[in-house]
Amino acid sequence: MIVGAGGGADMNARGAMGRYGETLAARRLTGAGMTVLERNWRCGRTGEIDIVARDGDVLVVCEVKTRRGGAFEHPMAAVTPDKAERLRRLAERWIQTHGGAPPGGVRIDLVGVLLPQRGAPVVEHARGVA
């Protein structure tokens, strides 16, 4: 069943797809030696950080974008300048609420997850995108 834009079954399916993509992204990051500190950290109306991780002494704020195969926009193209600025502000807020900046600074990464009609998901990790 598909309900009109903005709610119902369509939103549930997108939410489930997004959560699945975030799980795959967290696995990719931990497989690369990072430690996932938090997932889906919310900061009031400012927004949400999909994944907060530590890569050595660097704090990593990670945006995850998941798309179905054949979708118009590739997931790696989804971070606009406005989104990058919002991620920087969210990173600052996370640092303020968690005791200050780490010695290695902060990096903003993007994990794009492409879910093809057939076959395994394609997970791409780009470091330092913003």
Image: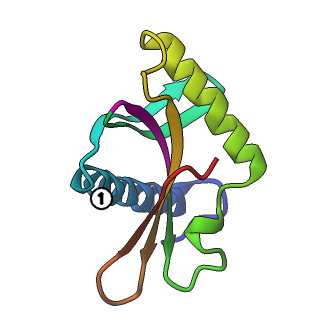
Q: Amino acid at mark 1?
A: Arg
The coloring applied to the image is rainbow
Q: Position of residue 71 (x, y in %)?
A: 59, 79
Task: State the extent of the magenta-drawn residues as a range.
Answer: 57-63
Return the residue found at the far bottom: 118
Q: Residue at coordinates 59% horizontally, 54% vertically from top-left?
A: 7
- Is 114 placed left or right of 7 in the picture? left
User: Which residue carries the number 1 mark?
Assistant: 28
Residue at (30, 58) in percent of width and height: 28
Q: Is residue 34 left or right of residue 72?
A: left
Left/right placement of residue 45 relative to residue 98 reads right
User: Above or below — where is 128 with respect to 46?
Assistant: below
Q: Residue at x 64, y 33 (%)?
A: 88
Q: What kind of element bears circle 1?
A: helix
In the displayed structure, would residue 117 be above or below residue 56?
A: below
Q: Main secondary structure of the magenta part?
A: strand
Does the magenta run of residues contain 58? yes
Q: Quadrant of residue 76?
A: bottom right
* Image vertical order of residue 5 relative to residue 109, above or below: below
Where is residue 42? Give x, y as percent. 50, 28
> Going 73% across and 54% down the picture, which residue do you hit?
80
Residue farthest front in this picture: 103
The mark tally for this picture is 1
> Is residue 106 on the magenta stretch?
no
Q: Position of residue 75 (x, y in %)?
A: 56, 68
Residue 117: x %, y % from top left = 40, 87
Front residue of 109 and 23: 109
| Circle 1 Cα neighbour tier, 10 Å, few/some/many (<14 / 14–19 / ≥20) | some
The quadrant where residue 15 appears:
bottom left
Task: Compare residues 83 and 54 and report the one nearer the observer.
Answer: 54
